[in-house]
Amino acid sequence: MATRSRRPALQPRRILVIHGPNLNLVGKREPAVYGNETLADIEARLSELADELGVKLEIFQSNSEGALVDRIQSARGQVDGILINPAAYTHTSIALRDALLAAGLPAVEVHLSNVHRREEFRHHSLIAPVAVGQILGFGGESYLLGLRALVALLRGQRSARS
Ligand code: CA2
């Protein structure tokens, strides 16, 4: 019988969670757009869900494009997947897109807000073509849904790839 993965059964999956620029301000400024939940609140909920799902999280936030690229580069071979809210770099960063491509890891893109209901410049994502999928518009819940989707993908429960 074919095995799904060469990974030892008891070794937990590792997921790198990346938050892009200004996400450290969420819950403290512009509550009308991003809600009252802080990044620490979202991370606490993510950690709880990670325990439930039996996965390990590494969490990184930076306002600097280069630091984000460096963190993604160093993830290759160290984690199994990436959950990323690239924030404003979603719409501008070829560097982040190239780094994700080079990492060769499944990535799920998440956004707090529904970017398609906002300014036109937020409608286009340079990251989407290199991500497995996108989840957006559910506030902090987008991260939780994204983590569930990524873990399901890693466990081979989802096979659609179009
Ligand atoms: O909706 C999202 O998650 C975004 O990725 C958030 C980014 C925005 O540039 C994207 O278009 C959509 C912004 C991150 C948070 O920026 C803040 C700015 C001022 C006050 C609080 C947060």
Image (spheres, rainbow, N blue to C red):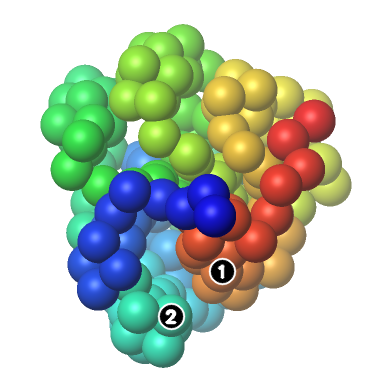
> Which residue position holds label 2?
53
Q: Is residue 126 left or right of residue 154?
A: right
One can see residue 142 in this view: no
Residue 161 occupies quadrant? top right
Callout 2: few (<14), some (14-19), or many (20+) C-alpha neighbours within 10 Å?
some
Are circles 1 and 2 on residues that touch, CB within 8 Å?
Answer: yes
How many marks the image carries: the answer is: 2
Q: How far, Cα to Cα, is label 1 from label 2?
A: 8 Å
Pick the front one: 58 or 42: 58
Furthest-front residue in this view:
1
Q: Does the residue labelled 1 lie within 8 Å of ligand 1?
A: no
Q: Is residue 104 left or right of residue 112?
A: left
Q: Which residue is drawn at 25% across and 73% down?
A: 10
Residue 80, given in percent of the width and then of the height, sits at: 34, 48
Residue 82's place in the image compared with 126, above or below, is below
Residue 105, given in percent of the width and then of the height, sits at: 40, 34
